[in-house]
Amino acid sequence: MMPLQFLRGFLMGSADVVPGVSGGTVALVVGIYPRLVANIRQGSRALGSFARLQFSAGGQHVRQIEWNFLLPLLAGIAVALVSLARLVETLLENHPVEMAALFFGLVAASVFVARGMVSRWDWARITIFIGVALIAFAVLGYRSGEADSPATWIFFFAGAFAISAMIIPGVSGSFLLLVLGMYEAVLAAVNDREIDVLIVFVVGAVIGLALFSSALHWALETHHDVVMAAITGLLLGSLRVLWPWPNGIDGPELSGPIADEFAAPFLLAVVGVGIVLLLTRLGQRSGAAVDA
């Protein structure tokens, strides 16, 4: 179980490195998303109790966290972020079309996985799905330029916003950093091992996650189908970011495929679909083990 959980975390971290791809999508596909959100919520409750100097209550919440589930997952995420940041940076720079096509296939297949998690599709849920997809498609066409040598304190807010997006399927924390103009700065901090900057970023991420996770857990518990319909729309709308042409994820412009560039991106998109189908099958088979 530990190696499998580490692998799930590695896949989540790998997804979070790439703008347009959500680690929450991977968690959803492999069948651990509700449990992940529940454990994050327990952690946020513990932080809240400690902040109020309620150490007994905080300790109780800490003991309720499933550490055997969470620690190998976090270890996998951390290893992926550190080991893949430079590789992804290089691939995105040298092969933007191919990389975008691969992840386009991954996210496109994930739309169908998320759709199946809505127990009943009525007109209200369909309207939410279409509305969120259209809004996401429109909003994701905008992005700002990269920040020039941002101050260290800005990384705190970048971490808080990015981590909140990372746990929502269909919302990429890396892409949000791109929109904020902080993606290259954060990637450079990881690659250059700028420990002080990374600590500020992580502190912001922890606080942002604590504030956001309780609301997300409540929404999933009380309005599961509505939330999942919205998430499915986010997945569909986020495909705009990953459309390979004209230049992959480097810009919001859309155009038709280029004839001599079609074959390889198409095959990579098929590979992306296959990865999701494989992860879905693994998630279904290991679902009972995850809940054990």
Image: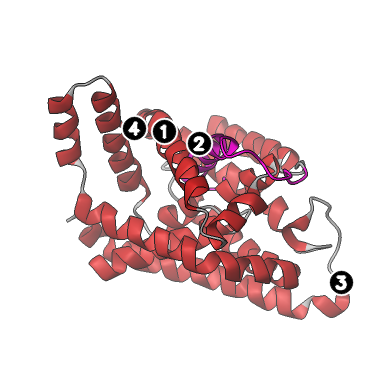
The quadrant the N terminus occupies is: bottom left
**Mark 2–mark 3 CB contact (< 8 Å):** no
Disc 3 target residue? 258
Of the residues shown, which amino acid type is indicated by label 1?
A: Ile
**Residue placed under numbered mark 4 in the picture:** 221
SS label for mark 1: helix
In-image side of 91 versus 111 (left or right) = right
**Lower position in the chain sequence, tag 2 or tag 3:** 2
Q: Amino acid at mark 2?
A: Ala
In this picture, residue 169 sits left or right of residue 187: left
Residue 172 visible here: no
Measured along the vertical axis of the image, is residue 30 above or below residue 186?
below
Q: Between tags 2 and 3, which lies in front? A: 2
* Residue 179 lies in quadrant: top right
- The label shown at residue 160 is 2
Which residue: 63% across, 53% down?
20
Q: Is residue 231 rendered magenta in the image?
A: no
| Of callouts 3 and 4, the N-terminal one | 4
Nearer-the-camera pick, 137 or 178: 178
Q: Quadrant of the C terminus?
A: bottom left
Most extreme residue toward the top is: 52
Residue interval drawn in magenta? 145-171
Mark sitting earlier along the chain (1/4): 1
Q: What residue did someone put label 1 on?
A: 207
